[in-house]
Structures are given as structure tokens and as C-alpha cells.
């Protein structure tokens, strides 16, 4: 049963609405004895934070995380870790006027239909603010992974925004941290900025995006077939992020057009064990990690809240034109980058712990 | 914790290996009082069955399902339903010669690494035979759905095989049941047959595919945000099918290139409630069904077992060339069609039951 | 997987330590549309609160609950409800001197052994303060039950304290709220007060207790056999309360000495359906409620923290004498009464929701 | 969500009815690489088997277990283990005449009320035959425990039958396997046999029993507070056994009458670590094992099916007298002994695996 919890062993339950007093998450199942302070978590929240970046919503939130439990004298104790972020910039009057209307493309109408009641302020529970709690949990996961698998690293970046793509021949991981779009291709930054400016200010629209998250240094053997497969859990995790409509592993949709000859990642014996000559599989075979980089890609739809009027109805069934003013990202995909990284961190740690439950972390030998 | 079980309320645990004495599944949480006999399940297994179709593996299995529990005098009792399918065509000697080698693109190596032991006969647990158990469970789910939501229907079909695509302007749902490829476009059948014949007999290869599964008549309000979203669970379910590498909801990866103006499914008030003027969202907003058709698409990679030699290693670490003779589908995607339908049925029923746990199935009114 | 969460549908995850900044719980799966404010929860916390009662610890905590999420304009929304109670009276220096010693009968040593680290201030996570979060969750459960099953009521009381027993012939439910011991027998109050005073001040000891919790108006049909039986879940819930060492349903341990003739609760047909002529079963048959009162009893061991020295060791393995000064209940069983009621409320609501998942709440008819 | 599954990591799902074609269980999460054949499981089933013992039901079932999956070449593979036991002695006509009546003390009426339908043959799902599947699962758990914790041993025995008690001063573990009552006190065997003979043939009744199960060699540190405590899970496991009405850990109900001075198990430093001078706690503190023997006791009510007429009703609401002829144990508690052992084995293994998920099995050091 899972409403607001994800994970098998490292279990994260998020709570909170966009305009409530606070939001956060309970992280249960965290191993004990791991150094952890707010300073380990805050940088990831800062990366996701709106208002730092002119391309994201201008809502100003410090998004300051507090650890309320589960840590003693700077170390995790194995008991539940409660992380709380207070909402300080709530300005709910911005949203009041559309309280009874359903924004096309938004979850307003489905929350209303399912629950018969919803917190309409800023999207309530369906707001992208919920992802702040995921990023905080991801900070905990990264701290634990850093202890358990020192060589593991996770990097997310945009590969597409609207009709613009990166050029993979110019791929530079170091570039990702240097620009507002988290793109690994310095040459596109100015062009994308102009494009997004136009989308927002001239077209009164928004655009979608594709995010790729790659984890390197992942040990072979993670994943619990058949229904806790690593790729199955990654798909679930990424699809649960607001506005995500597709998830790909490795070559993703493109595998359909490949032949079995092309798609086979050939294997040779390297000095430290098996090596693969390609990675169409995205580091996962049969739901279990191969030791190659784990590659996940997901598509984020354009922000639903736009300045162009769209036809809709209100709770009384009357037809209305909806225009959403206020602070909204013209491309929510940008802030989905740290969220995707956080989900990757949580899923990998979860499977590391789950695997040692069943196998003790002992691996079959080759050679 | 989930190794071999999926579902929140309608919980399916599959068990069994390709060449063991039997395989099957336990279906727990099924509502009582639903008429159910083997005859309700068998047709779906027959549809998936290898050997009926010259484009699929020539392995001959009657795949006869037996209900061992949970049904009394032709009605479900609310207790666990055990479904067993005996493996009658095991011919394990076919596989003996590759017992110690790892087939590129196959889960051989990851099962070995994770567990240190594997049943190498026919892929063991990682064989696509496991999906027979899913199809059986899907038969139960369909029988229950037929009682609970009479207007609901589920249809799966191929939209792409290798480099060949259907022409959606010729879409004809009735055609799907009439051809070996489950394609809704009669005009492509001969061409696809020639293409696949060439792939297998001349190219000694295999090809991937794209499957689309559409459910119509799904009530609004199904889905348990944030981590039991309907799309998140569908993504997990489809990604857990052997060889699937990508899952799309509605417009899928294509949403990245849309603007918010294009992507917004506008809403008007129809005689029976809200109506949408388009369905980019694939029937799901904020993880909750809208009442529109639920549209899921997934990509299946080409079969790993091919007649063309690929480089690999064996358990001793020696480099080997692997050629897989024996009975293998040149396009496993074909048989993934009934499997995708079964997963859709299971997920929808599960969410129908889960929803009535929390909300009692009562819906918010509009108008 | 369950570390700090209980419940199938109505899921409560508690967090927090005795001397951390706050503790609380996330309540997930709560039905939407139920009126709820802090005023619905606070009275139950006040009932459990230490310091109100001269027989319980003199720690002074207002135990003020705050609802941080899941409620909008005074109604539950179906999203997670976060309840937080700040710890205001932490005085951790009281506990400093025994930080490295293990109190006999206390979880100090096992937390140390399991986790290698523990928050030794006031018992940390193993403190009975955790039960404040349960009582808060129970307040939510009661508010929902009041809407869904208007006639249901829950009453807990002490039936034994140390060597003292109530006289059931004088049973008066109205008396429970009128005395400090939650006893339904006014005649024992003074005697018990003297006895407890002696135990604490003269014997420098503490005593155990037996608590009985009875729910009336419980509909027939709740309970999910075989491993989510109502009695099995009640046993788990009550045994999870600090210091509880035994749980009985109905006649409990005494059934061993009964014959099948005596134990059979005979059934007759009453005006509103089946009626039972006795209730040895405690309202549960085959793990499913019968419609009779659900009767649970549990034994609480004496407080481990006492003024009499006991032999023990410290973390260095040195033998020490442990005397626990500070604020401790001489009978923790007293405060276990509202905790037991809260667990009953949570379990019953959980099964009400779980049942409607599987059966839709429809009952088999008799007559 | 748990209908017919127990366990966090080592997950057992039982299925099957008394008079269906077969019953069994799926064991998921079992570690790989453990030697396992049917011969490891069968002896435990033989111990529980009815008909071997003149004091138990005369139903004749070979209860032959078959492993259908999850084991390859005599070793567990880490994939689900399906265990099936065919029902060969179904004689359902014995039960036909009471199909529409509700036996007092039996789950007939509650299954009818909950599900609106039940398999009335032999109690259907609520029959004690379900426990055969538990015993089979316990056999797997024991095989794994034997590898992982070589010194661990589990012994169950009766301490009370009806009004008869063992004399603990004559306790002899070796005696348990030598008599039909699984009693550790040879001196009572003849007396108990006469007593039970009288109960059945003269009194036309049945009697209850108390079973004690002790596990020695359990490592310290098992148990997942707060809601996966070792004692909480043991309480749930034992209470889920048919006819069990109470569960005690260590001193159980008797702790209520103890003082804190008496109840404190004092600790000294032994050559191999901490040693306790007594074991009132039954080997569990704060829900975590101490390393002392884990002691669980449970009470089983008298068999409901008796030859003496009791008042009841039928499905039409008519009042009837119920006399149950046929093959029934006069004391179901006898066969509950191997069932209790099996549950102990499953819970301990489950917690061993769960613990290594969170802590890696690393223990805090003392001294």
C-alpha cells in the first residue's frame, strides 16, 4: 500500500502542501552511524530552489531544511529522520481567483474528482513544491551512499528544452553546474535563454524538456526481480515526479528500431571483471544493475500555468477561460534536474539495502 | 518490500522458472462473489501462447491454467486464488551448451552476479515464460473489472516493429484480433511478415517493437498520489515486463517539444460531465485518471537470443562467442501485447480497489 | 517492510525522540472530507499527558499538537496529515549521568547493540514519549470513525495494578474518567493510591498493570485473514506499545482451561440479526469481527527506571550499579490506557478501510 | 497491505482451502545458495500431520510437499519458492450437512458475513489445514537459519492442556519428541491421555491448551522498532494461528504483578559479552532481541467442533442445534506446537534479513 511513501527499505514519506505552514518528509530505514547535518542536505535544496534563476518561478523561498529527529550528535541513529521545510512565501491571494476553476493540463480537476475537496492554493499537494521534500530525502541518500559506495556519483542534466537539443558531441559534464539550464553543452546556453525568454514573454507559453540522469560506480547486482526490478523502480520514481510523461532506460524508445545484433552489449573480460563494449541497456539487464552507468531519461511536459487563455470549466460546471498569472516556471523541466538526481539517489540506496537483506551483498564471482 | 509481488490491494505474486515443473501466481485481495472459472482465463493465455504463431517461438506449450484455490462453486471467495500452469515442453537439453556462457543483452550475467547461482535452463526466472503468470492474473482482473466497471475495455496492439510503423490514419481496432502481429492496420501485415522473415532467416537477427495499450471507460479519480500515482504504477508495471526499456503515457517523450498552449487538454462541459477536447495527457493528470482513455506505450528491445555470434564471456571469465540456437521469438514484442493488456487490467483493478479504501469510491461533483 | 509505520490503509508513521526538538507522526490514507482541527486531537493528548496526575512522571509538557498538512479549511483532504508536538521540557542533564550505563529492563542495551549508537537522553526513541504521537494519530482515527460508524465507542481502563485488581461486580464505565487510575471501580481508588505511594516512596520500586480496551458498535466483517486478521493486528499494535509483554483477546489465556462446550458462544437470531449469548471470543472469530464488543487486554511491565540499585554494565563492559533518579512513572501502565485506546481506534479504522477495498463494505446477509 | 502474506523480507503467502485440490505457500525473499530439498521440509509436516496421533483428528493425509520453483540442483536460487501440498483425503460429504449452519465458536459466521460466500467444506480457508503451509514455510526458514546462525535452535511444547499443567521442575526438553502431547514432562503423559480420552468420549467436549516456544542462540539486535518490533511481530504471527486467543512474551501477563525491582533482569559482563541474571523479558527489550532465549507462549481455545449440541442459527436465520460429527481434534493445541515453531523460525529469519538491510548485521560493541 503506497500513497505517499516510496522505497522498500529506505522509505521516504513526503507530506505537505504548497501553501500550508510547512512541508517535509520522514525518512525511515536509514542506516545508523552515518554523519549527517543540515549542511549535507541544504546544497541540494539550494540547487532546486526557485527564484535563484531567472528562468524559474520568482517565488522566493529560502527552503531551509531542519532535521527534527533521527540524528544524534551529528550521526544518524537508525531511527526515523524527520526533515521539515517551512513555507515562508505563501502569498495565497495570487491563487484565490482561480480557486473554483480547473486549469487545463493541471491536476486541479482530478484532485477535485477523487477527493471532493482540495487545497487550491498553489496547487496544494499536487504542486511541484512537494519535490523539495524529495530533494531533501535525496540529500540523506547521498550522504549514506558516499559512505557505502565511495565511487558512486550521480549527475542529472537537460538534453532537450522544447524544440532545442544539446549536441552530444560537445558533452561536458563540468559545464552542468555552470549554467542556469543544467546543460552539459555550453554552446547552447545563450540560445536556450533567448528561446525561453521568447516563449514566456512573447508566446505567453511554456515548454517541455528532457532530463537525463546518469549514475556511475553503481555495483553490479542491484535490483529485485520481478516486481522490484531496478528499472521498474526507477520508472516508477521518475514518473511520480510532477509533469513527467515518459521514462527511458538506456536507449529507451529507440530500442524498438534496433536489431538484436546492434542491441547486444558485447562483453569482454577486463582487469577488474566483466566489461561491456556498449551500453544500450543503460546499465540494467533483467532488472539488475550490470556495473555499467545507469542511464535514465524522462520527459517533462510544459508548465500548465500559462498566460494564454485556455477553455475550461469551474466546479459549478460553467465554462470559463483560464489564464494563470502569478509566478510560474516557463519550463518546469529545469528544476526537475535536481529532483531526478534525488530520486536516483533514493532508489539506488534503497536497492543497496534491499539487496543486502536478501543476499548479504555477496556477489557471484566471474573468472 | 516487493520482490515478486505487484499491486497494493489486488496483489499478484508470480513464481516459477522456464524449465521447472510449473509456474503460476497467487492472486490475493480479489473481491468475493465474482464468477470465475478456468474458461475466463484460458483465452488470454492462448492469445499469448508461443507456437500458435509462426512469428513467435516454436516452443509448444498448451499453457493450461488450473485454479487451485480461492474459487468455490464457480465464484471467487475473497481468499487467495492460486493459478498454476504446468511446464510440459521443457526440452532443457537445448540450453545445456550455453549454461556457463552469458548471452549478451540477456539477464544471465546479472542473475549470476546477484545471486551467485541461477537456473540457466531457458533463462530460468528471467525467461519471458514468467509473463504467462501475469496473463493469467490479468484474466482474473478482467473478470472482476467486467463486473465492477461494465463499460471498461482494454486493447493492446503493436504500433512499430523494428523500422516499420503503422499508419494511424488507417487505425482499425477490429483488425487487431485478425492478424499475427496484433496490428490495427491491415495494410502492413504482409509487409511486416516479410520483414520479420528476413530478419530471422537472412539477417539472423531480431527486432524490437512498440506496444500501445489503451483502456477506455476508466472512471475518473483512480490513482493514489504521490507515490502510488496511476501513471507511476503503470510505468512500474510495464517496465517490469521482460525486455521493456521505455514507458510513455499519452504523448510521452513528445511532450518535451510541445508548448503549454498545445499541451493543455481544454475542458468543456458535456451532457455527462467534463469532456476534454484532446488527450495529450493520456487520461492521467497529477497521477489520477481523468475519465479519458488511459494510453500507455512501451518499447521492447529485440530478442537477445540470436543466430549471429556476439562476443561474451563465461563464468570462468574466458571470452567466448555466443550463438543462440533453439526456439526464440524474432520479435518478443509481439507476445508482449497480451502481457501489456494484462498489466493494464491488474493496475486498473488494483487502483479501483485502492480508491474505494480511501474514498469509498465517492466522487467530487462538478456542475 | 515496516520500521516505524503501522496500518494497511490508514498508515501511521511516528518519528521523534524523547529529547529532540519535536516528535510526531504522518497519517497517510485518511479519508477526505472529514472535519478535523487540533481541538479534535488535543483532548486525547491531555488525557495521556504526564504531570497532570500525581501518579505519573512529573515531567511538564504541554504536548500541544499542530496540524502541518492534510487539512484545508477544517476538513481532511485525503493527503498526508502531519502532526507535530514540540518537546518543550527537555532537561537533558537529568539523564546525562547514566548515558553510558544500561538500565536493567530498559532498551538501552539493545538499541546500543543493534545500532551501535543511540540518543541516550531520556530513552531517545525507545522512550514512552513516542506514544504521544500514537495518541495524536488515534485522535484522527476517532474523528473519522465518528463519521463512518456513528455508534462505535472505545473505552480503555485498568483492571489490575501490581497485586491489586478491580472487582468486576462493581464495574462502572462512567467512573473511568473520574479518577487518576482510569479504573471502572470507584471503591479501589484510594487503596490503589496508597499502594502506589508506598511502592514509590517506601519500596523505591514500580509496578506493572493490566489494561483492557473494549470497542462496542464494531460492525461484523472487519479483519483480513489470514495474516491481517483483526486480532493479529490488535496483538501487534498493543505489543508494540512500550513495556507491553502480553496481549489477550476475549478470554485470553483462560481459554486454555475451558472446554469446547463452555467456550462456544451460542448464537440466536435477534431482531437486528445474529446475537451471541456470551463473548468468550472477544468479538473476533477467525480473525474477523462478529459484531460483538471487541475486547483486548494487555499487560504492562513495571517501569524499569527505579530508585533501587540494580546490577548492570556500561558501554565499556564495566559492572556498575544503576539507580535511576529523575521523573519517572511508578506505574507506566496508567498512561498506557489512552495509548491502548488510540491503537484500538487506529486498527479499527484501518480495517474498516481495508475491508471496503476488498468487499466494498457489502456484507453477507443472514435471514 | 497484508491479506495472506506475512514477513518483511522473508515473505510467506499461503493459499488453499481445506477441501480444495491443493494448498501451499509462496516463499519470497529467501536467500540464494542454501541447500534445500523436500526432505528438509517433510519431517516438520510429518510432525504436524493429523492421523499419526490418536489424540488428533483421524483425517488421513500424507501431506507430501512438492517444491515447484526457486530451487535448482538442490540449492535455493533467490527466486520465489512455491511449495504445494495436495489434498488427498477430502471426503467432503462429511461436512455437507452443516453447510448452511454456523458452528458456535467457529469462523463460519464471520466468513459468511464478510465475504457473502464461503467454502463450507471443512472450514474452507479458515480450517487449521492452512497451518500445513506455514509448517512447510517454517521448514525453509529452518534450513536457512541452520546456515546463517548455526547455534540457533527452536523448541515448542505444551505446558497446559485444559486444567492440566506440566511441572516445570521436571522439565526435560528431550522428552518432547517422545510423546504424543509434545510435553517436556514425562510424568504427565498418561494422565493427560486419560483426561483427553474422557473429554472426547465421555464429555463430548474438547479442551484448550498453552504452547510455549523457545528459541536459543538468537543473536542480539534483531527487531525493528517501533512497529516491526520482534515481540510485536511474534505476537502477530502467533495470534494469526487458528484458535489462538493470547500471546505472552517472557513473563507475559504475570509482569503486571511484579515490581520493577523483581522484573529488572540484571546484567553482568561474561566472557563472551553481556549476561543476564534472569529472563523476565523473554529475550526482548524495546522490541529488540537481547541474546537471551526468546520465549513466547500462546493459548489455544478448545476445538469448536464437538459432539455436544450447541444453539446456533443457519444462513436463513433459523435457529438450529449444531452437533459436529466427523474427524476433529479434541485438542487442536497439540498440533499447534509445530505450527508455533514454524512461525518462530519464519519471524526470526525475517528479522535476521531485515536487520542486515538496515544495519548490515554489524553490532554495537560492549567492552
Image (tube, coloured by chain):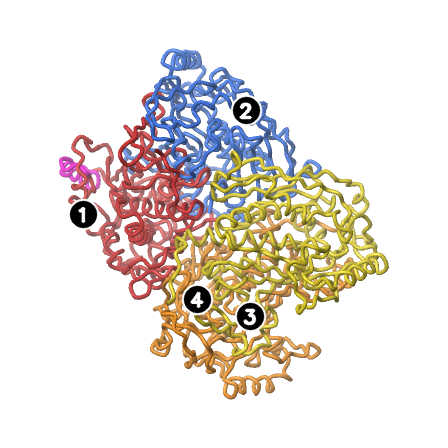
Chain colours: A blue, B red, C yellow, D orange
- Per the image, label 2 sits on a secondary structure element best described as loop
Q: Is residue B137 left or right of residue A126?
A: left
Q: Chain of mark 4?
A: C
Badge 3 crowding class, 10 Å Cα cut-off, few under 14, some 14 to 19, many 20 or more, is many
Question: Is residue C150 among the parts visible in the rendering?
Answer: yes
Same chain for the residues under marks 1 and 2 in the image:
no
Q: Nearer the viewer, residue D255 or A120?
A: A120
Query: Would you say the residues marked 3 and 2 are in contact, meaning their CB atoms lie under 8 Å apart?
Result: no
**Picture residue at 51% right of the left edge, 66% below the top:** D241
**Picture residue at 43% right of the left edge, 70% below the top:** C269
In the image, residue B329 lies at what x, y percent?
25, 46
In the image, residue B229 lies at what x, y percent?
42, 39
Main secondary structure of the magenta stretch: helix
- Per the image, label 1 sits on a secondary structure element best described as loop
**Picture residue at 75% right of the left edge, 40% below the top:** C90
Badge 3 is on which residue? C280
Membership of A143 in magenta stretch: no
Query: Would you say the residues marked 1 and 2 are in contact, meaning their CB atoms lie under 8 Å apart?
Result: no
Q: CA distance from mark 1 to mark 2?
A: 63 Å
Question: Is residue B16 among the parts visible in the rendering?
Answer: no
Q: Nearer the viewer, residue C221 or B352?
A: C221
Badge 4 is on which residue? C271
Magenta part of the protein: which range?
B184-201
Amino acid at each position: 500500500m503506497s500513497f505517499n511513501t516510496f522505497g522498500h527499505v529506505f522509505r521516504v514519506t513526503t507530506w505537505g502542501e504548497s501553501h500550508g505552514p510547512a512541508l517535509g518528509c520522514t525518512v525511515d530505514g536509514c542506516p545508523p552511524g552515518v554523519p549527517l547535518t543540515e549542511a549535507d542536505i541544504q546544497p541540494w535544496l539550494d540547487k532546486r530552489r526557485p527564484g535563484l534563476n531567472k528562468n524559474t518561478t520568482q517565488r522566493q523561498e529560502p527552503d531551509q531544511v531542519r532535521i527534527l529527529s533521527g540524528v544524534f550528535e551529528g550521526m544518524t541513529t537508525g531511527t526515523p529522520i524527520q526533515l521539515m521545510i517551512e513555507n515562508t512565501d505563501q502569498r495565497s491571494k495570487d491563487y484565490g481567483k482561480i480557486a473554483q476553476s480547473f486549469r487545463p493540463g493541471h491536476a486541479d480537476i482530478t484532485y477535485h474528482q477523487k477527493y471532493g475537496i482540495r487545497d487550491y492554493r498553489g496547487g496544494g499537494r499536487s504542486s511541484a513544491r512537494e519535490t523539495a521534500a524529495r530533494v531533501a530525502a535525496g540529500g540523506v541518500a547521498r550522504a549514506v551512499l558516499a559512505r557505502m559506495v565511495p565511487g558512486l556519483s550521480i549527475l542529472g542534466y537537460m538534453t532537450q528544452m522544447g524544440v532545442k537539443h544539446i549536441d552530444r558531441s560537445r558533452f561536458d559534464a563540468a559545464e552542468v553546474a555552470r549554467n542556469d539550464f543544467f546543460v552539459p553543452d555550453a554552446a547552447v546556453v545563450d540560445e536556450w535563454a533567448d528561446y525561453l525568454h521568447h516563449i514566456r514573454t512573447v508566446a505567453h507559453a511554456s515548454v517541455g524538456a528532457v532530463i537525463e540522469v546518469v549514475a556511475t560506480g553503481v555495483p553490479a547486482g542491484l535490483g529485485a526481480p520481478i516486481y522490484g526490478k531496478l528499472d521498474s523502480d526507477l520508472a516508477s520514481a521518475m514518473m511520480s515526479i510532477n509533469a513527467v510523461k515518459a521514462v527511458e532506460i538506456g536507449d529507451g524508445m529507440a530500442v524498438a528500431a534496433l536489431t538484436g545484433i546492434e542491441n547486444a552489449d558485447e562483453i569482454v573480460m577486463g582487469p577488474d571483471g566483466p566489461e561491456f563494449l556498449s551500453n544500450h541497456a543503460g546499465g540494467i539487464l533483467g532488472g539488475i544493475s550490470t556495473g555499467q552507468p545507469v542511464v535514465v531519461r524522462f520527459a517533462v511536459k510544459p508548465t500548465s500555468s500559462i498566460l494564454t487563455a485556455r477553455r475550461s470549466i469551474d466546479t459549478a460546471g460553467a465554462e470559463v477561460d483560464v489564464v494563470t498569472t502569478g509566478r510560474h516556471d516557463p519550463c518546469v523541466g529545469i528544476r526537475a534536474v535536481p529532483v531526478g538526481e534525488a530520486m536516483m539517489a533514493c532508489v539506488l540506496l534503497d536497492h543497496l539495502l534491499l539487496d543486502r537483506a536478501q543476499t548479504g551483498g555477496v556477489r557471484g564471482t566471474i573468472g
